[in-house]
Every structure is written in structure tokens, then in C-alpha cells.
Amino acid sequence: MLVVGLTGGIATGKSTVSNLLKSRQIPVIDADVLAREVVQPGTKGLAQIVAYFGSEVLLQDGTLDRKKLGAIIFTSEAKRKKLNSIIHPAVSRAILWNVFWCWLRGEKLCVVDVPLLIEGGLWKWMGKVIVVYCSADIQLQRLMARDNSSREDASARLNSQLPIAQKVQYADIVVDNSGTLQDLEEQVRLCLLKLERKVGWSWRLSWLFPPYALISALWTLGWGSMKRSRRRSRRPLEGS
């Protein structure tokens, strides 16, 4: 089974691509959904958050008060890092279990939708990486229209993230969402064709013969990571 990482920047259209993949019956593991699940009442994640931040970060029904917690970590880098040290390992474990269940079901491929795939280092564990891209100007205009925000506010939000042009350097496949929805749908179709050709017939052997699956996975991860590292090291020279 091929594990594909999907990422992008704010307002580039990653969620639209994710939904298009789901509509084609491709299993998508959404890290944002998992991040909410791992802090539900009764979970270890929520217990750790309460132990560190106090019960004031809970609503009356016992669920996490995300707005209050967000205000706390916004003003403290140390507290933000502590929260990440609780959430990220829990989400990573949940992703791993979901990938495992996809493999058990005999899926050819599964897509892991992670906004911070590059920043968090999870790209290293993906067989392929897809980055949804649009130009910085289009990204800014879309963000302003979506959130009804000023140019200054939208620019500040974009500047707080890793630039989309840098994320592209990690991509095996770039989906350019600079055009219409119809253009995007065609790019997603072509993207799936590439991925299915990559999987080929080997997915059946991987499922029937687990040792082959392990060897194939290690080879794919190692080779893919090495190729992406080489591309990143070459691109600055090519642009000079």
C-alpha cells in the first residue's frame, strides 16, 4: 500500500483536493479530525492538557475550550511547545493506526492530510508527497475573500507560515490550484493516475505477504526521502 502525504498552505485549496479524493473513494486520514479526537473527554491527551494547563481550559460539559487554550498558548512559546508535545505524538499514533487499518482492508493507497506535514517532519514517513500550490498573490486574495480580512491581516497570517514555494521543494507531485475548479478536478484525476501507476500490481503482494510489505515500505520511504532531499539541495542553485 502506498501512503501519500497531502499538504499545502492556507487558502491554497488543500481541503478541496482532499474532498475530491474522498469523492473518488480514496481513503483520507485527516490529521485535523484526529487532533480533535485525541483530546475528547476520557482521553489521555485531554488528561495531560488539564494536568498542565488546569481545569479552566475545560467547558462546562467537560470538553476542551479551544478558544481559551488558544489564547493561553498564543502569548507563551513555552506553553505552545508543551501543548504540541502532547498533541503531536497522539496524532502521530492515531495516523499510524489508521494507516494500519487501511492496509488491513487491502487498500491500494491511502492519503494522510496534514497541514503541517513539512513543518512537523512527517513528510519523511510518506511514500509520496503531494503539495497543493497556488501563487502567493492568489493565496493572499483568496484568504482575504474567505475571511473578509484586510490585506495587512492576511499578509501577517501568511507570513507566519512556511511559504508555499518552500513546501513545493518537498513535493513528488504538485497540484497547481491557480485556475478553476474544473482545472483542479483534472489535475486530481491525473495525480491519481500517477499514484496508481506507482502502486501497480505490488499492492496485492504486499497485502498477501507482509514481509514484502515491510521491505517495500522501507525502500519507498528511504528512496523517496533521499530524492526529495536531492531536489531541495539543487533548486537554490538552479535559481541562482
Image (cartoon, rainbow, N blue to C red):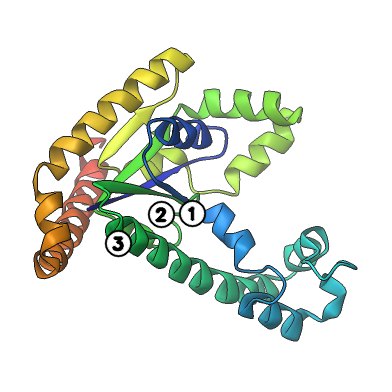
In the rendered image, residue 26, in percent from the top left (x then y), is placed at 36, 40
Please give the residue where the numbered disc 2 appears in the rendered image.
118
Would you identify the image quadrant in which residue 164 lies?
top left
Q: How many marks?
A: 3
Asked if residue 196 shows in the view, the reply is yes
Would you identify the image quadrant in which residue 214 lies?
bottom left
In the rendered image, residue 86, in percent from the top left (x then y), is placed at 59, 76
Q: Nearer the viewer, residue 178 or 27?
A: 27
Q: Amino acid at mark 3?
A: Trp
How far apart, in angstroms, are the residues tagged by discs 1 and 3? 13 Å
Q: Amino acid at mark 1?
A: Leu
- Callout 1 touching callout 3 (CB < 8 Å): no
In the rendered image, residue 56, in percent from the top left (x then y), is placed at 87, 75
Residue pictured at 22% horizontal, 55% vertical: 229
Residue pictured at 9% horizontal, 44% vertical: 201
Q: Amino acid at mark 2?
A: Ile
Please give the residue where the numbered disc 1 appears in the rendered image.
116
Asked if residue 170 shows in the view, the reply is no
Q: Nearer the viewer, residue 226 or 216?
A: 216
Please give the residue where the numbered disc 3 appears in the rendered image.
125
State the residue lying farthest toward the right: 60
